[in-house]
Image (cartoon, rainbow, N blue to C red):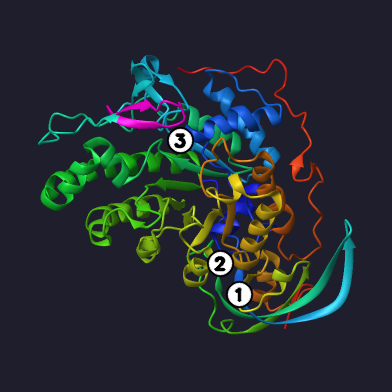
C-alpha cells in the first residue's frame, strides 16, 4: 500500500467554543478572520486505527488557531482535527503557535 | 496538500484544505455528454480505440475540473480482449460482438443498445433456466491480462491522487441477477437458497481475489457498486439483503480493509434502511446519496461521524434543468450543511446525460473549489479564475506531441 504517512497521528476534538479575534488577513480580495476554537479532545483520527488517545488527554481542552472565511466555518459541535505537528505538540505537552491550552 | 491527501482526509473525517471532488463514470449514457460536450469544450480529443489514450484524455479533463480521485478497473483477460471490442456505450464495455449493437461479456451476459444508442439492456442471462451451476465456468480473476492496464495507471497516479478501484462490473445482487435474470433471481432468493448461496459464493471468491490484487498494487479505495434501491425504496427486503448479501459484503470488506484499503459503496436510490448495516460491515463512504430521494443533511446528522458522503448534487433535476445559480446554491448549501468537520466529497449524483448543461456541470466543480475551502492554519488562495460565468475558458493543455499511445483490443 502507498498510503500517505499511515502512521501520522492526528488528534480530534469537538469544537465547544469559538473566539473571533477580529484579526483579518486579506488574501486574493478575501478577508480571512483568525479564530480560536476551543476543542475537547476525544480521539485519534481513524487514519490511525490502532492508536488510542492517552487517558490523560481525553477530555482535555485545547485551543487551536484557524482562519475562517465563510459562515459555515464558524460551526460548533463538530469534530475538528489537529494537524500532525499540533498533535505531536499536545502529546509532548509543548504548546505551539497554533495549539495551546 | 495534494489530491490524494485531500481525498483520504475526507475518508478519515478530517478537514482537508477543501472539499474533495469526485468524477463520475464515463461509460454508458454519460458517454455522449463526454464525447459531444465536455471533450470538445476542453479541446480534448478521444484517441479512438485506445483504452490508454482515452484514459489519458479523461485524466486531463479530471485535472481541469480539479477532480481528486482517479478510477481504475480490472479488464477481461488478454485472450478475451483479442476476440472482443471495447465500446463505452455498453454497461460492460468489453464484449464479443454477437449481433448488431449487441455484445457478450466474459460472463456470457449479452447486452444490446437501445434504439437511440444511449443505453444497453440485457438480452441474454447465461444462467437463465439452468438448475445447477456445475456446467457454468466462472471467469478466472487471476487470468493473464486482467490487471495490465490498471497496474500501469495505479503506478502513474498513486502518489498524486486517491485511486478508487472497481472490478469492472457490479456487486453481488446486481451481478447475480444479470447472470440469472431478475425475476428468477428474486424467486430463487425465496425458494432456491442453495442456488443463490453458491452463486454469490462464486462471486465473492472472484471479488476478493480482485480486491486483493488492487490492494497489492496500491489502490486506496475499493468501490463496490451494487444498485439495491429505487428512488421509492429497496429493491429487495432488508431481510433478504441481510440473508444473502450482507455476510458476503462483510467478508469482502474485511479482506481489503485488512490490507489498508478504504471501501466506498455505490447504490442509486433510497437505501436508507441499509445504512446502519453498511456502517456495521465497515463501509467508509456512501455514493451517491441521491438528493431526490435521500436527504443528505439527515444522513449526515445520523451517520456523518462514521460514513463519508460522496456525490449529493442532483443529476436528475438541477444539472439538466436548473440554472448556474441553482447549481451554485445547491453546492454551497451542501457544503454548508454537510461539509464541516470533513467527510464530504462533492460530485454529480450520477452519470451526466446529454441534456446536462455544460455550464451547470462545470459550475459544480468551480463552486466547490471556491466555497469548499476549509478553515486552515493559513488563509487560502482563491482558486484560479479560469472561468467566465462558470464556464472555464478553453484550456490549451494537450497531450505532448509524439507521445506514444498504447492500444489494446
Residue B108 on the magenta span: yes
Point out residue B66 in the picture as x, y percentages from the top left corner. 68, 44
Disc 2 vs disc 1: which is toward the camera?
Answer: 1
Q: Do the residues bearing badges 2 and 3 touch, measured as CB atoms within 8 Å?
A: no
Whether residue B147 is situated above or below residue A38 in the rendered picture: above
At horizontal 38% and vertical 59% (from top left) the residue drawn is B271
Classify residue A89 as left or right of residue B284: right
Q: Quadrant of the C terminus of chain B?
A: top left
Residue span colored magenta: B107-122
Task: Please give the residue where the numbered disc 2 appears in the rendered image.
Answer: A45
Choose between B50 and B130: the one closer to the eye: B130
Tell me the SS state at disc 3.
strand
Point out residue B317 in the picture as x, y percentages from the top left corner. 55, 50
At horizontal 49% and vertical 34% (from top left) the residue drawn is B29
Task: Please give the residue where the numbered disc 3 appears in the rendered image.
Answer: B73
Q: CA distance from mark 2 to mark 1?
A: 14 Å
Can marks 2 and 1 be said to lie on one chain? Answer: yes
Choose between B368 and A89: the one closer to the eye: B368
Can residue B374 be spotted in the picture?
yes
Task: Please give the residue where the numbered disc 1 appears in the rendered image.
Answer: A78
Classify residue B189 as left or right of residue B311: left
Whether residue B353 is situated above or below residue A77 in the rendered picture: above
Counting other residues with Cα less than 10 Å from the Cα at mark 1, is it few (<14), some (14-19), or many (20 or more)?
Answer: some
Mark 2 belongs to chain:
A
Disc 2 vs disc 3: which is toward the camera?
Answer: 3
Amino acid at each position: 500500500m502507498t498510503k500517505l504517512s499511515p502512521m501520522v497521528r492526528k488528534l480530534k476534538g469537538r469544537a465547544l467554543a469559538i473566539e473571533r479575534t477580529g484579526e483579518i488577513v486579506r488574501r486574493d480580495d478575501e478577508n480571512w478572520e483568525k479564530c480560536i476554537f476551543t476543542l475537547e479532545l476525544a480521539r485519534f483520527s481513524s487514519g490511525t486505527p490502532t492508536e488510542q488517545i492517552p487517558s490523560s488527554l481525553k477530555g482535555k481542552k485545547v485551543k487551536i488557531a484557524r482562519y475562517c472565511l465563510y459562515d459555515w466555518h464558524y460551526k460548533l459541535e463538530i469534530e475538528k482535527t489537529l494537524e500532525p505537528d499540533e498533535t505531536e505538540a499536545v502529546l509532548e505537552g509543548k504548546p505551539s503557535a497554533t495549539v495551546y491550552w | 496538500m495534494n489530491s490524494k491527501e485531500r481525498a483520504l482526509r475526507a475518508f478519515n473525517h478530517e478537514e482537508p484544505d477543501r472539499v474533495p471532488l469526485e468524477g463520475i463514470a464515463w461509460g454508458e449514457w454519460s458517454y455522449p455528454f463526454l464525447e459531444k460536450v465536455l471533450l470538445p469544450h476542453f479541446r480534448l480529443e478521444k484517441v479512438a480505440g485506445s483504452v490508454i489514450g482515452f484514459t489519458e484524455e479523461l485524466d486531463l479533463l479530471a485535472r481541469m475540473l480539479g477532480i481528486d480521485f482517479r478510477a481504475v478497473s480490472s479488464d477481461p483477460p488478454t485472450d478475451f480482449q483479442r476476440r472482443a471490442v471495447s465500446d463505452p456505450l455498453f454497461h460492460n464495455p468489453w464484449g464479443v460482438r454477437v449481433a448488431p449493437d449487441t455484445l457478450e461479456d466474459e460472463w456470457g451476459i449479452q447486452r444490446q443498445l437501445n434504439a437511440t444508442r444511449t443505453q444497453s439492456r440485457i438480452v441474454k442471462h447465461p444462467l437463465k433456466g439452468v438448475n445447477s451451476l456445475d456446467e457454468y465456468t466462472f471467469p478466472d480473476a487471476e487470468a493473464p491480462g486482467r490487471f495490465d492496464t490498471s497496474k500501469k495507471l495505479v503506478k502513474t497516479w498513486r502518489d498524486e491522487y486517491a485511486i478508487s478501484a472497481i472490478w469492472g462490473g457490479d456487486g453481488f445482487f446486481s451481478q447475480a441477477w444479470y447472470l440469472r435474470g431478475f425475476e428468477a433471481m428474486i424467486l430463487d432468493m425465496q425458494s432456491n437458497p442453495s442456488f443463490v448461496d453458491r452463486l454469490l459464493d462464486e462471486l465473492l471468491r472472484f471479488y476478493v481475489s480482485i480486491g486483493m490484487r488492487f490492494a497489492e498494487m496500491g489502490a486506496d479505495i475499493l468501490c463496490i457498486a451494487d444498485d439495491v434501491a429505487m428512488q421509492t425504496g429497496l429493491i429487495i427486503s432488508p431481510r433478504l439483503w441481510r440473508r444473502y448479501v450482507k455476510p458476503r459484503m462483510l467478508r469482502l470488506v474485511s479482506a481489503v480493509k485488512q490490507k489498508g484499503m478504504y471501501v466506498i459503496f455505490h447504490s442509486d436510490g433510497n437505501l436508507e434502511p441499509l445504512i446502519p448495516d453498511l456502517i456495521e460491515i465497515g463501509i467508509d463512504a456512501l455514493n451517491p446519496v441521491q438528493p431526490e430521494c435521500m436527504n443528505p443533511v439527515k444522513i449526515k446528522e445520523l451517520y456523518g461521524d462514521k460514513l463519508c458522503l460522496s456525490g449529493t448534487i442532483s443529476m436528475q433535476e438541477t444539472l439538466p434543468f436548473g440554472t448556474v445559480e441553482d447549481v451554485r446554491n445547491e453546492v454551497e448549501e451542501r457544503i454548508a450543511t454537510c461539509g464541516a468537520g470533513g467527510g464530504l466529497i462533492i460530485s454529480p449524483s450520477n452519470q451526466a446525460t446529454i441534456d446536462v448543461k455544460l455550464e451547470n456541470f462545470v459550475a459544480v466543480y468551480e463552486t466547490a473549489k471556491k466555497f469548499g475551502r476549509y478553515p486552515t492554519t493559513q488563509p487560502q488562495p482563491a482558486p484560479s479564475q479560469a472561468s467566465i460565468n462558470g464556464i472555464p475558458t478553453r484550456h490549451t493543455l494537450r497531450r505532448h506531441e509524439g507521445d506514444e499511445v498504447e492500444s489494446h483490443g
